[in-house]
Image (cartoon, grey):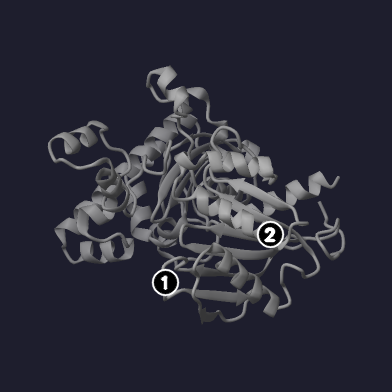
């Protein structure tokens, strides 16, 4: 697809997409020209609704970031500040060439399995999914509402974190619960980080010079939140996060997999309330709970100095990661590539080394010298004799949202 020349007002030739990622107290944004993939501007507005201390950090093109203090009582104020920053660079919401706004929406349930043009009905259905993502979907909805008010004539597209995992087969998506209870309360595996897993699996195939439909990839998205996926020929067939982002790998502050009876025990014997248990498992567990630190760089440093708690935290993290790698080798049957991405996956050579050590029997071997190289874009770190390609692939969720948004708008205009 070759876009036509840029024209004003979101017309047929417009090629720019503004991506908005509205969190509970922040807005990340990026303006992308899909004619050539260039990042025209981007930034972060943070501490929304938290009183003093709000700020916006904005970067135009490849220039230096500029930072301004702001008072952001709500997301509407933050998004208006974003619009002003863009306008100052001649890239405002009313500037020529803006084709659409793409919004990250965390939870699409079973209803939304692809990027979707926002209508009043769609927005109502996203609101109805709030019980499945109470911290995220309301902020996502607010971002859409404000963007629609600022440019009611412009297509708004919702891109869902859960959508890439909608292809999970029933045996992978369904928990072994009473069927009627599970169906009544929408209890199933949804998976998250979908835009990252989709981007990285496709980019890994490109790194290998192959069509995504020919490649089976295990993607390890390792940030403060962490998830794994098994992607067979471009289609996700298994993922580690479940009904919520709590299940799966050990994360910065989340426990990941745990015996459900631990919750009953802590309630009955420890007297912890439901809210206290939620706080414990989501915000006070994982690496933080094990050693008081959730920054992997600091954990590695402490471990190298002989800190026992940091060493245990690292070992628990790696053990869980290796279990999932092995399990997904079994799920896929044939693995062509293992891809590390996100903050830890892209930057921590010790994690990549430990996670793959001793997996030669699965065809996985890492070259120590390649693994130790500093971050430098997509690259292979596997040993020459490794049957499975091991890659480090920087993720780009904002670009993936822009790509999906532009493709949908382009199709809808014929």
User: Distance between the Cα atoms at labels 2 and 1?
Assistant: 24 Å
* Direction left: furthest residue: 269
Q: Pointer 1: what residue?
A: 51
Question: Please, what secondary structure does the residue beneath circle 2 have?
Answer: helix
Does residue 306 appear left or right of residue 297 in this picture? left
265 vs 389, nearest the viewer? 265
Q: Which of the 4 image quadrants contains residue 124?
A: top right
In this rendering, position of residue 18 left or right of residue 319: right
Residue at the spot of label 2: 149
Q: Residue at x 21, y 57 (%)?
A: 291
Residue contact at pointers 2 and 1, CB within 8 angstroms: no
In the image, taking residue 62 as reference, residue 7 lies left or right, namely right
Query: Residue drawn 63% across and 37% down?
Result: 214
In the image, which disc is placed on residue 271?
none
Regarding residue 256, the answer to whether it shows in the image is yes
User: Mark 1 packing: few (<14 Cα in 10 Å), some, or many (20+)?
Assistant: few
327 relative to 380, above or below: above
| Residue 72 locus on image (x, y percent) | 50, 70
Residue at image coords 62%, 69%: 80
């Amino acid at each position: 697809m070759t876009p036509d020349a840029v024209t004003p007002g979101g017309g047929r030739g417009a090629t720019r997409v503004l991506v908005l990622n509205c969190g509970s107290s922040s807005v990340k944004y990026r303006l992308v020209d899909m004619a050539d993939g260039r990042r025209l501007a981007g930034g972060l507005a943070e501490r929304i609704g938290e009183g003093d201390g709000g700020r916006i950090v904005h970067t135009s093109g490849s220039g230096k970031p500029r930072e301004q203090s702001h008072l952001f009582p709500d997301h509407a104020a933050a998004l208006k500040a974003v619009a002003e920053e863009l306008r100052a660079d001649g890239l405002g919401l009313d500037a020529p060439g803006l084709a659409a706004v793409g919004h990250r929406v965390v939870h699409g349930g079973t209803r939304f399995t692809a990027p979707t043009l926002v209508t009043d009905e769609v927005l109502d259905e996203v609101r109805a999914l709030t019980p499945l993502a109470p911290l995220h979907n309301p902020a996502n909805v607010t971002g859409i509402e404000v963007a629609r008010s600022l440019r009611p004539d412009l297509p708004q597209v919702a891109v869902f974190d859960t959508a890439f995992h909608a292809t999970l087969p029933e045996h992978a998506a369904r928990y072994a619960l009473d069927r009627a209870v599970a169906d009544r309360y929408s209890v199933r595996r949804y998976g998250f980080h979908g835009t990252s897993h989709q981007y990285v699996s496709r980019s890994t195939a490109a790194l290998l010079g192959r069509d995504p439909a020919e490649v089976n990839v295990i993607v390890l998205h390792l940030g403060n939140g962490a998830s794994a996926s098994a992607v067979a020929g471009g289609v996700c067939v298994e993922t580690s996060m479940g009904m919520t982002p709590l299940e799966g790998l050990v994360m910065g502050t989340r426990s990941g997999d745990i015996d459900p009876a631990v919750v009953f025990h802590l309630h009955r014997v420890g007297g912890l309330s439901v809210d206290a248990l939620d706080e414990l498992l989501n915000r006070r567990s994982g690496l933080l709970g094990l050693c008081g630190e959730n920054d992997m760089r600091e954990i590695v440093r402490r471990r190298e100095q002989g800190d026992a708690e940091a060493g245990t935290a690292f070992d628990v993290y790696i053990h869980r990661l290796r279990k999932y790698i092995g399990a997904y080798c079994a799920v896929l049957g044939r693995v062509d590539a293992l891809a590390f991405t996100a903050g830890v996956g892209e930057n921590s050579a010790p994690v990549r080394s430990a996670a793959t050590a001793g997996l030669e029997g699965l065809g996985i071997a890492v070259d120590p010298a390649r693994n130790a190289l500093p971050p430098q874009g997509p690259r292979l770190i596997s040993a020459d004799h490794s049957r499975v390609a091991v890659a480090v692939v920087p993720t780009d969720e904002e670009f993936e949202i822009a790509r999906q948004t532009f493709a949908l708008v382009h199709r809808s205009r014929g």
